[in-house]
Image (cartoon, helix red, strand yellow):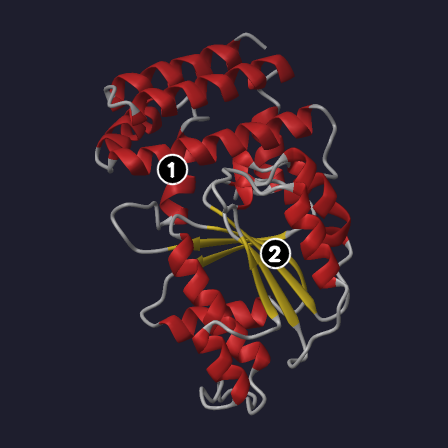
Amino acid sequence: MCLNLKKADSTAVCAAELIKTIQSGSFLIEGPDKDIIGKEILEMAKGLFCSRVKENTGYCRQCNDCRMLEKGSHPDIYRLEAGGGSSVIKIEDIRLLKERVSIKPFQAQKKIFIIRDAERLSVAAANALLKTLEEPPAGVVLILITQSVSQLLPTVVSRCQRIRFSQDTSGSYADFEERDHLIAGFFDKDDKKTQKKLYEDIGSIERNQVGDLLRELVCVFRDMLMIKLGVEAVNFMSGQSGQTLRRWSENFSAAGIQMLIDEALRAKYYINGNANTKLSIDLLIKTINKSSSDL
């Protein structure tokens, strides 16, 4: 499952969408602003925890659960992130989380566990978390927040329901439909007009939005490689449909796709380093076209 959520005019609207989606299980939320995502999760938690909530009326903001959530002191919501001078989330942190998961809720009907900057999970910590992600106890909600799904182990991603969260800001690529349209342009090598327009469209967006675009392209290549290698049991990391990914992967070899992952990452690195965006994209498109022709 991969659900795209856009930032609404009010927090409550987006939180309402989260409440409909998140009831129990493991979820991976991807978005450019982890603080805003955290606020939305807090609003969602009120809807799940509120002792006076009624269908279609929302939470009361006055009961003990709502007040404790506002103060950040609710015993049934647990937050984990890298801390204490460490740049990673350690296996010891996950072991403590798993102990807490096994304990029944103290006050509410559910327990929520939030892991911020999930891409900072050490390999050992991520592996230690897999079974809990796959089979969380009843009434437990596990939420991983990340700015870059591509930095997570595929085994972690495959065990979560994915939610793409965007904000309408100039610093992020909020329009997933437009982004996916641009992604498709990379694979239309036989349509000169499409690729010419691709140059123009990419040249008109912010440099950091180009970075977002290339990050998604890396996820697309990764999914295509999984298909090429016959590993389709793993959930796709990109927002593309399986049918589209299979169609695109037919034009490339596994070795060619692996090379394109490196080339897309290299282009992203150069663009982040202030290199000429159009030249970097031009080189990437030519490499994609050549790799397809060499099959």
Who is closer to the viewer here, 73 or 9? 73
**What amino acid type is highlighted by mark number 2?**
Phe
Q: Is residue 59 something one can see in this rendering?
A: yes
Q: Quadrant of residue 228?
A: top right
**What amino acid type is highlighted by mark number 1?**
Asp
Q: Please give the name of the residue rendered at 61% of the width and 36% of the height, measured from the top-left corner.
A: 122
Q: Secondary structure at mark 1?
A: helix
Crowd class of label 2 (few under 14; some 14 to 19; many from 20; radius 10 Å): many
The x and y percentages for residue 37 are 43, 59
Mark closest to the chain's N terminus, 1 or 2: 2
The x and y percentages for residue 238 are 54, 40
Who is closer to the viewer here, 97 or 127? 97
The x and y percentages for residue 198 are 31, 29
| Residue picked out by circle 2 | 27
Residue 206 falls left or right of residue 71: left
Q: Please give the name of the residue rendered at 53% of the width and 73% of the height, measured from the top-left corner.
A: 45
Badge nearest the viewer, 1 or 2: 2
Q: Please give the name of the residue rendered at 53% of the width and 35% of the height, measured from the top-left corner.
A: 150
Crowd class of label 1 (few under 14; some 14 to 19; many from 20; radius 10 Å): many
Q: Quadrant of the C terminus?
A: top right
| Residue picked out by circle 1 | 212
